Image: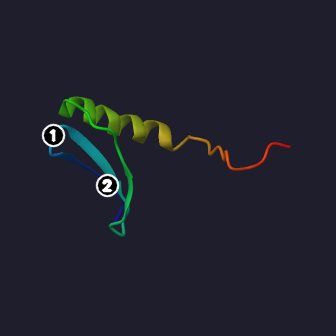
Amino acid sequence: MAGKFIISKDKRGEFRFKLVAANGQTIAVSEAYTTKAACVNGVESVRKHAAEATVVDETLAAV
């Protein structure tokens, strides 16, 4: 089973998504969106950009 995005409403009525791994563990939680359409756009943005994103480790000391 693959991971999944889950869209929900928070207590303030705003939309959020979370990315959940195949084992059920939450990997990431989004910011709050005022509309469901904006939330869906956020999901699509993550899907589009995450596969090619680089990792920048800012904990490494500058040499």
Q: Is residue 63 left or right of residue 24?
A: right
Q: Is residue 24 left or right of residue 56?
A: left
Q: Nearer the viewer, residue 29 or 3?
A: 29
| Quarter of the rendering occupied by the N terminus | bottom left
The residue under the point 41% across, 39% down is: 46
**Residue 57 position within the rendered picture, expressed as x and y whole percent measured from the top left:** 66, 47
The 10 Å Cα crowd at callout 2, few under 14, some 14 to 19, many 20 or more, is some
Q: Is residue 38 left or right of residue 62?
A: left
Q: CA–CA distance between discs 1 and 2? A: 24 Å
The extreme bottom residue here reads: 23
Q: Secondary structure at mark 2?
A: strand
Q: Is residue 30 left or right of residue 11?
A: right
The image quarter in which residue 20 lies: bottom left
Q: Amino acid at mark 1?
A: Arg
The residue under the point 33% across, 39% down is: 31
**Residue 47 position within the rendered picture, expressed as x and y whole percent measured from the top left:** 41, 41
Q: Nearer the viewer, residue 23 or 33?
A: 33
**How did the renderer colour the structure?**
rainbow
Q: Which residue bears the numbered disc 1? A: 12
Viewer-nearest of discs 1 and 2: 1
Q: Earlier in the sequence, mark 1 or mark 2?
A: 2
Q: Amino acid at mark 2?
A: Lys
Q: Nearer the viewer, residue 52 or 55?
A: 55
**Residue 13 position within the rendered picture, expressed as x and y whole percent measured from the top left:** 13, 39
The residue under the point 32% across, 67% down is: 24
The image quarter in which residue 48 lies: top left
The extreme right residue here reads: 63
Task: Tell me, for residue 4, which label it has, or none.
Answer: 2
The 10 Å Cα crowd at callout 1, few under 14, some 14 to 19, many 20 or more, is few
